[in-house]
Amino acid sequence: MKQMIAFVIMMMSALVLTACEDAKEVKEQAVSTEAKVKQAWQEAVDEVKAHSENWNDKSVQKLLDDAKSLANNAATEGQDKLSELLAESRELAEDAWQESQHQAGELSEEAQEKLAELEAKIAEVKAKLAQK
């Protein structure tokens, strides 16, 4: 009985740890995406600065507006991806939790059946001893 409980606890812990590792990966991907967006923005700004002497004010402003728009789109896309990854991670953790609860319930039913069988055998042995 203790071994079954220990097994259930071990399985639940493994499922929770798996979900935590997935959440950690999602966070790492979000940080990586953020760094890429910042790097792209900095490269765009550097490019504008390097070429600003050759362009008139309208061209520079248009390029800056385009760069800002691209950076905003990239940031929005990164945020959407992060939200999707976090939602998937939550779903995975919930599924793992529900599965562990389901498995724990099945083991409890099996344990109850075994207990009932054992009680029946004890009753039989008592009845046989009482007859002697």
Image (cartoon, rainbow, N blue to C red):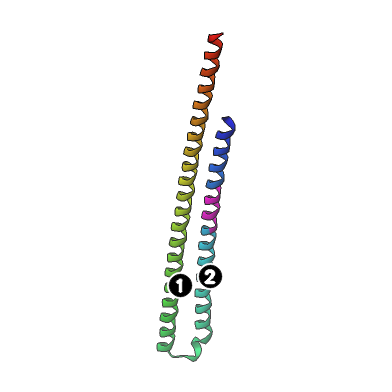
Foreground residue, 91 or 8? 8
Q: Amino acid at mark 1?
A: Ala
Considering only vertical position in the picture, is 8 above or below 67? above
Q: Which mark is residue 19?
A: none
- Please provide the residue range marked out in magenta: 17-25
Would residue 77 be found to the left or right of residue 7 on screen? left
Marks 2 and 1, how far apart at CA: 9 Å
Which secondary structure is most common in the magenta stretch? helix
Q: Position of residue 123 (x, y in %)?
A: 51, 18
Of 29 and 97, which appears nearest the observer? 97
Report the residue marked by disc 1.
74
Q: Label 2, on which residue?
A: 36
Picture residue at 42% right of the left edge, 69% below the top: 76
Label 2 sits on what residue type? Lys
CB under 8 Å between callouts 2 and 1? yes
19 is within the stretch colored magenta: yes
Residue 100 in the image, given as x and y percentages of width and height: 50, 43
